[in-house]
Amino acid sequence: MLSVTSAPAETLPLIELDRATVVRGNTAILDALSLRIVLGQHTVLLGPNGCGKSTFIKLINRELYPLAREGEAPVKVFGLNRWNVAQLRTRLGLVTSDATRDLQEMPHLSVDDAIVTGFFASFVLPIDQEVTAEMRAKAAEALARVGAQALSGRLVAELSTGQMRRVLIARALVHQPDALLLDEPTAGLDLVAQQQFCTLMRELAGQGITLVLVTHHLEEIVPEIDRVLLMRDGQIVADGPRAQTLTAPLLSQVYGGTLSVRCEGGIYRAAAS
């Protein structure tokens, strides 16, 4: 692995992987993956489809588990190797395309209720727990925080993909988390919605929320995200600041083809050449 920078030493750990391996069949989807992301360090995991990015998300979300071994735990979040997912959501918000689908499959779910479900780590309001006025107030505040107050009162089944992304972020923000883990957040968005979403990411970064972005699109890497982890075949092949990692030689190596790279206004773009 090419390492061109190192994480600040005196900061709180957010995500730590120590030689984490995930195997499906006879294939190592993540191959002894080691990385450390600290709070306040906006980071992107970038790589082609099939490189292990989605597996990384599922590892953090406890949908998958690494191979067990003696010694240090392969996966830690906020310094802990064991955690309750509902409790984890109070500190680390997760925004995925899967959540968009799950919520929009509920035809009678309102936007306001969808955001409140974030308090329960569920996609439905529980019948055995009280939804308090404070929860409703925090949900409304979170919706305003993402600039989507106009969506209040609507059904999630009626929303566009771009509108749903804002609802999902509001849902993640009800706990005022320290960080957001964003998995391919602009997938399915049109060009205007993509630009609006990137603007929202910049605003959230400015509010002190640590962003961990998982993507294969360079255009999603807003200027506030300066640490880049390049992935290929379940491993990190480069780790460093944007200017030293988002280069034509490195990206060509990672994506397996000749690419040209340009940067305009702090946004990088790549094209096959």
Image (cartoon, helix red, strand yellow):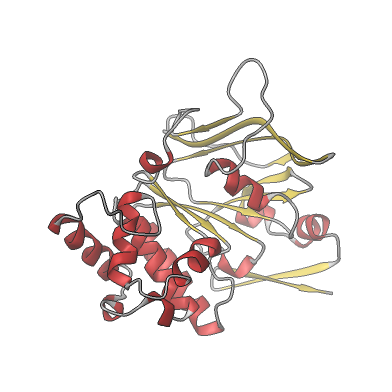
Residue occupying the far front of the picture: 127
Instruction: Look at the image and tell me whether residue 207 can be seen.
Output: no
* Picture quadrant of residue 147: bottom left
Seen from the viewer's position, the closer of residues 52 and 212 is 52
Give the left or right position of residue 188, taking residue 271 as reference. Answer: left
* Picture quadrant of residue 10: top left
- Residue 258 drawn at (x, y percent): 85, 66
Residue at the spot x=55%, y=83% of the render?
191
Residue occupying the far top of the picture: 71
Image height check: is 101 above or below 50?
below
Image height check: is 273 above or below 59?
below
Seen from the viewer's position, the closer of residues 146 and 242 is 146
Residue at the spot x=29%, y=60% of the render?
116
Give the left or right position of residue 86, taking residue 99 as reference. Answer: left
* Picture quadrant of residue 21: top right
Image height check: is 128 above or below 266?
above
- Residue 128 drawn at (x, y percent): 25, 49
Image height check: is 154 above or below 6?
below
- Residue 34 drawn at (x, y percent): 65, 34
Residue at the spot x=40%, y=58% of the render?
205
Residue at the spot x=51%, y=64% of the render?
222
Number of labels in the image equals 0
